[in-house]
Image (cartoon, helix red, strand yellow):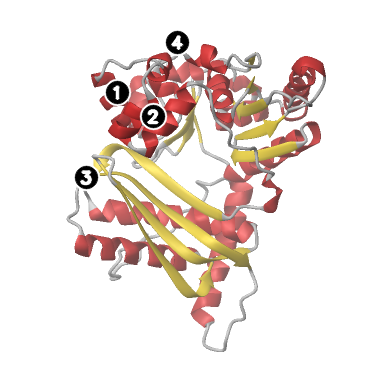
Amino acid sequence: MERSLPRRIAHFDLDTFFVSVERARDPSLRGKPVLVGGRGGRGVVASASYESREYGCHSAQPMSQALRLCPDAVVVPPDFERYSACSRAFHEILRDCAPIVEPGGIDEAYADLTGLGEGGTGARAAAERVRDRTRDELDLPVSACIAGSRTTAKVGSDRAKPDGLLVVPPGEDAEFLAPLPLRDLPLVGPRLGEQLTALEVRTIGDAAALDPRWLERRFGKAGLLLADRARGVDATPVGDGRRGARSISREVTFEDDVIDLEELRRTLRAHAERVGADLRRQSRRARTVTLKLRWSDFTTLTRSRTVAQPVQLTDELAGVGVALLDELLARERLRPVRLIGLGATNLVEDAVQLGFDDGETQRAASVDRTIDAIRGRYGGEAVRRGLRRGRKDHRE
């Protein structure tokens, strides 16, 4: 009987991606504490360099707070068009060097390197080619881990930072994971982490030592999943990401829980700007818009609406998102919100015929295209929409 080859799954992660792109453009930023984000009153840190993290700065933090912690930090406005271009180039390098690649986001991806060379040496060589080409062609650092499963590779790439390669030998996933903090496992969120810590389960190895049947009784399906992942067992295949995105979404976890309805609406509007820009860039429209809301106790609610005419415009996306929020709050008492997101799913090609009465739609489309062009050339903070007064949703 022919023996199956040990799986060699790699996870690649561009280190402090936005900061690294800015440093590639302006080498004088290297070695300095750098914050990428807006400087305005509601500015938020999109990316923080390792130097600034030593002062307590981190992404999704209010810029004002970050600058109090690190007054000498250099603030750079984000250039999302440039980041997208670098991301596309990075993923092209991956597809050149690996047989199967699955994008995991703008700055990360999984690759199946199984069967490349004797004893997995080809897997290491492929990962090194990715790192070398990313450094040479894009001037960007990328950390990676090769292991027997996606979970271990994901955990390991964090351990390889900054700009390192970590290889977990075949069959040693559980041994590698065992001494690491439990919260390093991607599926262990704050709530589950607190429950397990109360039971004196502090490392991944502690979780692996627990009876899977007890974990299932205590935590349901999440318990069974935890039992496998803590042992490095994850048979999830790496899928070929060339089929294109099935959905586009944006979400934000607030630094402090929000209970101001107007702030939630403004955040949805900002999400609609980004989701709409992505749809227009890909020449796609969405039949379904989804709202995601997470209370401070981590209870997560979603509401979706499928529209008669596929949407792409910022106004349309924001309008549906705000309507879903209002409908949800008509049934649920507003409580402190930890996270809010807006998603576009059920995507179709951009082929909608306008009628004679669609002048307003055409004007809105023209505004969106103009804003997209300005931001593409001068950066995401180059232009902002004004406040429309007298509207029920108080859109920006």
Q: Residues within 10 Å of mark 2 (few under 14, many from 20)?
A: some
Residue type marked 4: Pro
* Residues at discs 1 and 2 in contact (Cβ within 8 Å): yes
Of circles 4 and 3, the one toward us is 4
**Residue drawn at (37%, 22%) of the image:** 211
Q: CA distance from mark 1 to mark 4?
A: 16 Å
Task: Look at the numbered disc 1 and give the secondary structure of its residue.
Answer: helix
Q: Amino acid at mark 1?
A: Leu
- Left or right of residue 212, residue 376 in this image: right
Identify the residue under disc 1: 196
Q: Disc 2 marks which amino acid?
A: Val
In the displayed structure image, the side of residue 45 where residue 175 appears, left or right: right
Closer to the observer: label 1 or label 2? Answer: 1
Q: Against 229, is 260 above or below?
A: below
Mark 4 in CB contact with mark 3 (< 8 angstroms):
no
Location of mark 4 (residue): 179
Q: Residue at x 46, y 55 (%)?
A: 343
* Position of the C terminus by quadrant: bottom left
Q: CA distance from mark 3 to mark 2?
A: 22 Å
Q: Residue at x 56, y 76 (%)?
A: 362
Q: What x and y, as percent, mark residue 221?
A: 38, 38
The residue under label 2 is: 188
